[in-house]
């Protein structure tokens, strides 16, 4: 089956960095498609079948779904019943920036990496609050784009908070004290920028044990976690200084500039040289 692609460049207002619409029936939704942006949708009435990545999710009123740029999906009736849902789309870099602000790598990975997009159930009060904000995005997009952008960021933060609370409730495992201490040490620039050799100096655990623990608690490898810290540091320097990109890459701990460019673009959806003009 043909999968159509939707692109942020044609659908999202660059001054708002988001857009909002209500789909009144699955019959009016896009057929099977993918896109290069993040999407959050909420079933506001009825129920539907959400076909995504070759699997099916059965959604009902109050279901909120976090769609990633690599997901492909479509909608259908569920047991003959239709639904309505509101849909808010975001530039990739807006969501990645929100993850940076939250500062919880395991949570970001828990949303990014599962085979199926994460789903959480909203209370009636929470759903109404998000609906009001989404309607304000639509209103201000035509009258005051700065306000629309602010409301879109507020909607995103509230939605991610709901997912985060669900994530915390599901996370019953407690990190071993030694691992929690190690993560604290790795927040220091002199440690994360020195990479795996420094990580090995900070603990007496074997590489195999470290790999298992990182994947168990953070859902990523030690290398991926170190790169996450390095990229966050590099992004901050890009936005707050005028240092040359090559100096920033080396300062963050990357000794290969092309590898830095590749990781940065993959993480934030934008090249290092362009992010300074983004905010």
Image: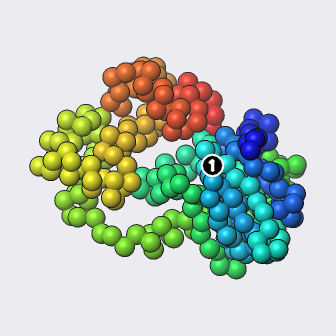
Residue at 15 percent across and 47 percent down: it is: 206
Could you say which quadrant of the image residue 178 lies in?
bottom left
- The answer to whether residue 190 is seen in the rendering is no
User: In what quadrant of the picture does the C terminus appear?
Assistant: top right
Residue ID for mark 1: 71
Residue at 56 percent across and 28 percent down: it is: 271
Residue at 87 percent across and 50 percent down: it is: 143
Q: Residue 278: x and y, percent?
A: 63, 34
Near-viewer residue (247 or 29): 29
The residue sitting at the front extreme is 1
176 to 35, vertically: above or below: below
- The answer to whether residue 49 is seen in the rendering is yes
203 to 79, vertically: above or below: above
* 106 horizontally vs 72: left or right: left
Near-viewer residue (22 or 192): 22
* 68 horizontally vs 189: left or right: right
249 to 141, vertically: above or below: above
Q: Residue 234: x and y, percent?
A: 43, 33
User: In what quadrant of the picture does the N terminus appear?
Assistant: top right
Near-viewer residue (190 or 217): 217
Mark 1 residue crowding within 10 angstroms, few (<14) / some (14–19) / many (20+): many
How are the colours assigned in the image? rainbow
Could you say which quadrant of the image residue 120 lies in?
bottom right
Could you say which quadrant of the image residue 176 lies in?
bottom left
Label 1, secondary structure: give it.
loop
Q: Residue 264: x and y, percent?
A: 49, 32
Q: Residue 41: x and y, percent?
A: 71, 61
The residue sitting at the bottom extreme is 124
């Amino acid at each position: 089956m043909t999968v159509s692609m939707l692109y942020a460049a044609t659908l999202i207002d660059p001054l708002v960095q988001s857009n909002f619409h209500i789909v009144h029936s699955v019959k009016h939704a896009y057929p099977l498609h993918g896109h290069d942006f993040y999407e959050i949708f909420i079933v506001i009435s009825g129920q539907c079948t959400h076909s995504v990545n070759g699997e099916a999710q059965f959604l009902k009123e109050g279901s909120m779904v976090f769609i990633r740029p690599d997901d492909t999906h479509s909608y259908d009736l569920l047991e003959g019943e239709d639904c309505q849902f509101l849909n808010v789309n975001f530039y990739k870099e807006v969501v990645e920036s929100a993850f940076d602000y939250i500062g919880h790598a395991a949570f970001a990975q828990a949303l990014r990496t599962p085979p199926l997009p994460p789903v959480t159930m909203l209370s009636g009060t929470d759903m109404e609050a998000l609906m009001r904000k989404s309607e304000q995005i639509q209103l201000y997009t035509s009258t005051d784009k700065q306000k629309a952008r602010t409301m879109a960021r507020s909607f995103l933060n509230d939605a991610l908070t709901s997912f985060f609370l669900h994530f915390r409730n599901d996370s019953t495992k407690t990190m071993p004290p030694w691992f929690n201490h190690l993560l604290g040490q790795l927040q220091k620039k002199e440690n994360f920028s020195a990479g795996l050799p420094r990580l090995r100096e900070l603990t007496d655990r074997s590489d195999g044990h470290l790999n298992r623990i990182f994947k168990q608690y953070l859902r990523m490898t030690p290398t991926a976690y170190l790169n996450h810290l390095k990229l966050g540091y590099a992004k901050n320097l890009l936005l707050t200084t005028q240092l040359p990109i090559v100096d920033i890459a080396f300062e963050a701990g990357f000794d290969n500039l092309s590898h830095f460019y590749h990781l940065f673009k993959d993480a934030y959806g934008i090249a290092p040289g362009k992010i300074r003009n983004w905010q």
